[in-house]
Amino acid sequence: MNQTESKQPKQKAILLAKLGTLPELSNIVTELAQLLPGTRLLGIGAEGVSASPQLEVIAHERQLVLGAFDAWWKEQLYVDPDLYVKLLPRESQLLRTIERVVRHDVFQVDKPTFPTEPFRDTFDGRSQLLLRQIAFWDSILMKQNVAAVVAQSIPHNFWDAVLYAVTEAREIPYLFFHEVRPFLSSVYFYERLEEMGNLNRSHDLIQATKQRYGMVPDSVGRAEFMYKQVSTESTKFHRESGKKQKFTFTKRVTMLLRTPRHVPFKVYRSLTRRFIDYRSRRRENLVAQSRSLPGKYFLIELHIQGNATTLMKGYMYGEQREMVAHISHSLPAGYSLLVRESSRQSSRKQPRREAFWQQISALPSVHIISDELDSKDVLLKSAGLIELGYSSLVMEAINLDVPVIVLGLTHLHGAPHAHVVTENSTLPLVLKQVSEQPQRRYWSPDAIQEGLYEWADRTRESTLQASLSTTFTNQLDSDPDFQVRILKNVSRLVATWYQERVK
């Protein structure tokens, strides 16, 4: 049945938001079709991947970024005012997620062919794109009789954030998977963003899946692999790799020449971005300190702009300046806050806005520090690390017996030395409690390791051994059942969840 038909289908449908679009995972659709006969499966077409015969493609991934949905014009779609009222509390956050569009390579996606202005990063440009996305996804949910949505990852790429918000407003069940360090190849799953870190529901769903369908057992070495992932060595490796450029010069040139007619525009954009990034780094260096650190301080390392953490997990902050200001005004008497730039920000050529560093450095008791300072030395002398969501610096701090104060949505609940701030107003109290701990740590390396292993064990019992957004070459070399395990366990868990929540 076509999405433009006005008559509502009789059969209920599941919308798969990018789940199963990788070539290695396309058979998830086949597995689900067998487990849920009579339920239609809707999905999104992907570049270079043949859609499964059981999948009804409602859009292509090239249409998602700029909302190039022909149905919007052909059917003259509009946003239901009652729906818009329900979405108003999320409107600001959704407009901010359009930063993903601003930073996207718009030469690689479809542009609308119907009458609309070219996308520009203005308030009106963002608003028009948001309204078009809301109208389209609401039309799909209603006309296709979508009873549930299952997403490959945490909603943060703008289009999927809109889909999540509309689905929530329409009170349609939504399930999303989430793969995050340190436990790569271990996938969390939640129904709501606010549930992040709560493993009770996911543990129960795994048990229900085992009873209903059975599950392919984990690999023999999964526990040891997860223990290794929380080690200091693994943390250092990932932090160092994050500082490096992602693409070689040859690869960049190859990507540039894929569409010759766009080369002049791409070169201009790249040179402009590099120049702005140079100026941003220069402004940072003007206020950064490399010596004479304060005696008593907390440390925070910023996140790169426009990622899932800053857009979704740190939803309570309109920008990272607001977060630093909140911390600054919550510090215990006599304490300072050291702010360090993300190790990934410069490598990705994502400059901060012009007045950012000047505003940060002007905040009370805030000091910008150079990224040349040794992170281990700075951590050991600190009263604690303050973290938004998660970064690899968390594992380094925990292994060094340094407390971690966590803001925003996070999976760090229950991790040793992690103090998760569940209510923003309690931050001053948490910082004061941490600052009153003895300066000399009492956790031995063995005790820290034991605490991390217990946390890993609890996580293993409530997550799937899987990876839904990467290729599996390395895993297949050591575990030939890795791909089969993903296909079987993910589809069976989705089927169990759907039958519990819908049928």
Image (cartoon, helix red, strand yellow):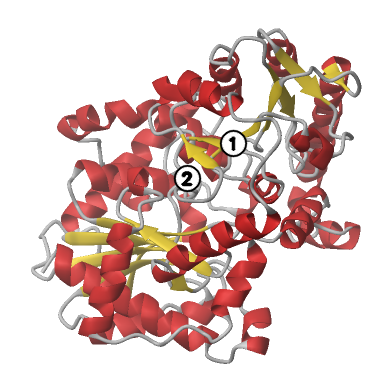
Q: Quadrant of residue 319?
A: top right
The residue under label 1 is 387
Residue 382 x, y percent position in the rendering: 72, 30
Of 35 and 47, nearer the camera is 35
Residue 106 in the image, given as x and y percentages of width and height: 62, 46
Q: Amino acid at mark 1?
A: Glu
Q: Residues within 10 Å of mark 2 (few under 14, many from 20)?
A: many
Total residue callouts: 2
Confirm whether residue 333 shows in the render: yes
> In the image, which disc is placed on residue 22?
none
Q: Nearer the viewer, residue 313 or 299?
A: 299
> Can you say which quadrant of the picture contains the C terminus?
bottom left
Local secondary structure at mark 2: loop
Residue type at mark 2?
Answer: Thr
Q: Residue at coordinates 53% horizontally, 52% vertically from top-left?
A: 110
- Disc 2 and disc 1 in contact, CB within 8 angstroms: yes
Quadrant housing residue 190: bottom left
Mark 1 packing: few (<14 Cα in 10 Å), some, or many (20+)?
many
Q: Is residue 54 visible?
A: no
Q: Position of residue 90 (x, y in %)?
A: 34, 31
Quarter-of-image position of residue 51: bottom left
Q: Which residue is mark 2?
A: 410
Q: Tell me if 337 is positioned left or right of 112 in this view.
A: right
Q: Position of residue 188 (x, y in %)?
A: 43, 61
Q: Left or right of 458: which side holds 90?
A: left
Disc with the residue nearer the chain's start (2 vs 1): 1
Q: Nearer the viewer, residue 217 or 344?
A: 217
| Left or right: where 436 falls relative to 489 | right
Q: Residue at x 49, y 18 (%)?
A: 428
Q: In percent of the image, x 82 and y 43: which residue is there?
A: 267
